[in-house]
Amino acid sequence: MDQPERQPRKLGWRFALLAVALAMLISGFVRALWLDVYYIPSASMEPLLGAGDRILVSRTDFQSEPIRRGDVVVFDGRGSFAPLNSGNGPIQDAVAAAGNWLGITGSDTTYIKRVIGLPGDQVVCCDDQQRLTVNGQALEEPYLYEGDAASKQKFNVIVPAGRLWLLGDHRSMSADSRSLLGAPGGGMVPLDRVIGRPVQIIWPLDRIAAVPRPAEVSTTAVASTITKDGH
């Protein structure tokens, strides 16, 4: 008499598990190829993005449009911003990976910054008005955090082929390409490490908003663009 009652329950659990597995598979496929979710752990990109924001990142935008000076990019910092071997052990790494996948914790190897220098650019801090210059032309930076200088750290770099020079918008709070001057790679991020572009803030609720792609940062120089393969 009990068997007819237990069988539907067993089938119900199996169906639920199958549905969860299928949902995770579809979600993984979408996030690997189209849209992913990332957590912003710091204030380095204020005022555009704040600590605690969860963002959707398009993996396809730069496949059809070239990366421009002024674009905000999410990238894998291994080999440039982060050590290649930064693991803390299999259990800690698994917990961290789960938190990153769910978008509830930040990643030790994934970063978000703004493109200031494209391959071949000479980027200098600063001119007599304390502005960055690119190829000898002053850079207009309306996105900077209010009250921040363009940079208090002096530098004069030439971006190699296939690399990017990246800075945060909240310069006084940002560890970025400037922090790695003199290190192997000099803070230059390979183009093939770019994951995508933030397109939407999805959390917290009072911060939900699209993240529009900015116009290319203006100088009096001829506009430059570059595709991810460096051409």
Image (cartoon, grey):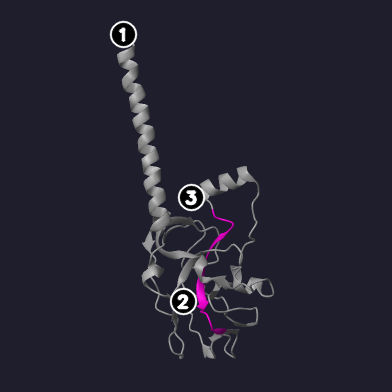
Say which mark, if any, is on residue 71. none
- Quadrant position of residue 202: bottom left
Residue sitting nearer the eye, 106 or 171: 106
Say which mark, if any, is on residue 70. 2
Q: Which amino acid does label 1 sit on?
A: Met
Residue hosting label 3: 101
Residue hosting label 1: 1
Viewer-nearest of labels 1 and 2? 1
Q: Give the range drawn in magenta.
A: 106-122
| First of labels 2, 3 by sequence position | 2
Image quarter (top left, top right, bottom left or bottom right) of the C terminus: bottom left
Q: Can residue 46 be seen in this view?
A: no
Considering the numbered disc 3 on the image, is that residue within a helix, a strand or a loop?
Answer: helix
| First of labels 1, 2 by sequence position | 1
Q: Is 149 on the left or on the right of 230, as rendered?
A: right
Q: Residue at x 65, y 46 (%)?
A: 89
Verify whether residue 113 appears in magenta. Answer: yes
